[in-house]
Amino acid sequence: MRRLLRKRLDLTIVVVAYDMARELPRTLCSLTRDYQRHCAGIDYEVLVVDNGSPEPFGHERVAAYGNNFRYFYLDNPPSSPAYALNYGAERARGRVLCLMVDGARLVTPGVLGLAAAAFRAYRDPTVAVLGWHLGEDLQYRSITAGYNQAREDALLAAIHWPEDGYRLFEIAVLAGSCLDGWFRPIGESNAVFIRRDAYDRLGGFDERFDLPGGGFVNLDFFRRAVLRKGSELIVLLGEGTFHQLHGGIATNTGDERERQDLQHRWEAQYKALRGGAFDAPGKRPVYLGGISPAVLPSLASSVQLAMEALARGDSLFAGSE
């Protein structure tokens, strides 16, 4: 990976967005110093890579969130976000990168401070945040039952977001890649942290994942980052990323036949590139974080799922125990 030399910072968050005029402002708000807790001593920047939106979001709107927010617009980019993520990483000044493949994701207030603590405590961690969907069900199902952006706006207003970002847990369900909860392997993270030199050694995101939306590109990167030799997997307990409804190809396709067709295409491409079916990395994590009252129901259900797995004779983290 090519590096552009600039003054080094502690952390760069790369956020990829496409046509998210409604959703991106909330995502950026959730990454500001006013919203994030315990990050006063962290020198960080947020890079928004606009992946060719018909109406560019614009430098001025991004800069309004702070002088550490920067904006790049890609004209006629590939439809996969892989190129945009690598483009942002090349321009990052942080010693650590946070890659957010989907700019429609709100984060909880402890994510940046806890991630920074993980890189102080561990030599070469991969830090993961579990994913959630806003609403009462996975969004590809909830939209067929009438869930829409107006109802989502009402949910956020009801919890008075962004006053207490942890109340997002009250109005969301675990995403498909994390359905087994906190104490089983997860398939991906939509806010994954890694040292930039480790990112370079991995070759970044594989741009051969060129299907619209990227297919399994984020799952592939996460698996490679977690399983690289010598890396510790750190899961931020009690934190999350929360997907807003925006018509995304991966999460907001309500037609079941179309969704299944997409899934088959993504699986076939992954198998062609990696030589086998995708499997969530089974490395045993270290948990770092705290517990807010709103996260307790998901913790309780996660414990139940883990106990059921043990009762079946399954290993919680296959290959790591």
Image (cartoon, rainbow, N blue to C red):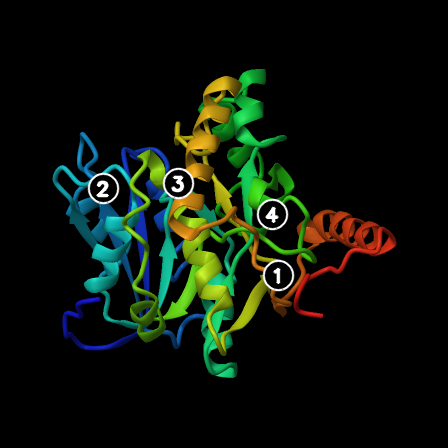
User: Where 49 sits versus 134, above or below?
Assistant: below
Q: Residue at x 22, y 61 (%)?
A: 67
Is residue 276 visible in the rendered image? The answer is yes
Q: Could you say which disc has been placed on residue 178 in the image?
A: 4
Give left or right: position of 172 versus 4. Answer: right
Residue beneath the point at 33% across and 42% down: 25
**Secondary structure of the residue carrying numbered label 2:** loop
* Amino acid type, mark 2: Asn
> What residue is shown with label 2?
51
What amino acid is at disc 3? Gln
> Residue 88 appears in which quarter of the rendering?
bottom left
Q: Residues within 10 Å of mark 2 (few under 14, many from 20)?
A: many
Q: Residues within 10 Å of mark 3 (few under 14, many from 20)?
A: many
Q: Earlier in the sequence, mark 3 or mark 2?
A: 2
- Residue 181 percent across, percent down from the top left: 67, 50
Please name the residue that numbered disc 1 is placed on: 282
Find residue 310 and report its horizontal and vertical position in percent: 83, 56
- How many tags in the picture? 4
Label 1: state its secondary structure: loop
Taking the image as shown, residue 55 lies to the left or right of residue 232, namely: left
Above or below, 20 against 200 in this view is above
Question: What amino acid type is highlighted by mark number 4?
Answer: Cys
Secondary element at image label 3: helix
Is residue 175 visible in the rendered structure shown here? no
Q: In front: 152, or 174? A: 174
Give the residue drawn at x 64%, y 65%. Answer: 290
If you read the primary sequence from the N terminus, does the residue marked by circle 1 or circle 2 appear first?
A: 2
Residue type (three-letter) at the residue carrying disc 1? Gly
Marks 2/4: CA distance?
26 Å
